[in-house]
Amino acid sequence: MLEKVIDASGGAYRTTGFDSVFFQVYTGVEFLPPKAERRNLTVGLSVDTPNHRTARDPDWKKRVEYWEHSKRLQSGSLIALVVVSHRASRIFLGVVSSFSADVAESAKANAERIQVRISFFDAEVELMALRRDTLSVPGNASRFALLIDNNVMFEASRPFLERLQTIEPTEIPFARYIAHNGALNSVPLNPPRYALAPRFAYKLDCLAKKGHSGRIQALDITRPGAVEVARRQLRDHSRLDPSQIDAVINTFNREVSLIQGCVGL
């Protein structure tokens, strides 16, 4: 399988199964000199250009346009460098630190090779780059390297993952919902703690439509029947539609709630 990937100069692939993952494979990986960036040290990699007609077009303008608008190797996405030597493999994870314009600029000079800069999590890769270790030997099936990119924007998740590394398991917020094995149908959704405080009530009159001010009572979720009264008053006197009313009531009545709607609304 790997031999076919290398002969094809990489390409786009998808795993099988219900949770299939789409990913890109780049071959012919070689080190470029490390570079000190503002935040960290990045390692440059030179890889084979994907076997795509526009990416390898003789016209450099078309190549540049392709990479400027491509979703491949986007800044902040998670990548894996797979190094194979004598049937032993090592995997190094990192994040793309270069931008689409940088990749496009490298494609301008060479139709068959592109360059990308990576911030690796393991400092060993930086040492390998400083030594200019040979990663890929043409025609040698026992020594090669692959770069794998699946467009996962790691930087968006980094703060949460770093926090999970330092927090005690017993202190994880909403652990009874997040770390639950199986369906959540049997897990009761508790009200927010602050909503259970004495004399606490949600002021809903700000949602009233013009001319109906004062007709929507404050919602005290601890009072029997108050939720249904609030739902009815919102339906009769607010500017919300039925689905928005359900979202508001569910959010006020539960400590965890998911609201999905159109972008921009």
Image (spheres, rainbow, N blue to C red):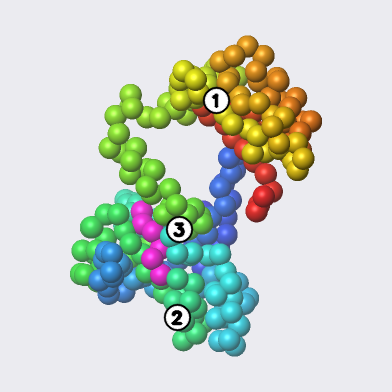
Position of 115 compared to 232: left or right? left
Which circle, 1 or 3, is nearer the viewer? 1
Q: 103 and 247: which one is in front?
A: 247
User: Where residue 32 sits: x, y (%)?
Assistant: 31, 74
Labels 2, 3: front one: 3
The residue tagged with tag 3: helix, strand or loop? strand
- Region in magenta: 93-98
For the residues bearing labels 1 and 3, Cβ distance under 8 angstroms: no
Residue 217 is situated, as x and y percent measured from the top left of the image, at: 66, 26
**Distance Cα–Cα, label 1 vs label 3:** 44 Å
Q: Which residue is mark 1?
A: 201
32 over 78 or under it: above or below: below
The mark tally for this picture is 3
Which residue type does callout 2 highlight?
Answer: Ser
Instruction: Name the residue located 36 percent from the left edge and 57 percent from the top edge.
Output: 94
Assess whether mark 1 and mark 2 are in contact (beta carbons under 8 angstroms). no
- Asked whether the residues under the numbered discs 2 and 3 touch, taking CB atoms below 8 Å apart as contact, a structural biologist would say no
Residue drawn 77% across the image and 40% down it: 211
The image quarter in which residue 114 lies: bottom left
Q: What amino acid is labelled 1 in the image? A: Ala
Whether residue 65 is visible, yes or no, is yes
Q: Which residue is mark 2?
A: 106
Q: Which residue is mark 3?
A: 77
Q: Is residue 46 magenta?
A: no
**Residue 44 picture quarter:** bottom left
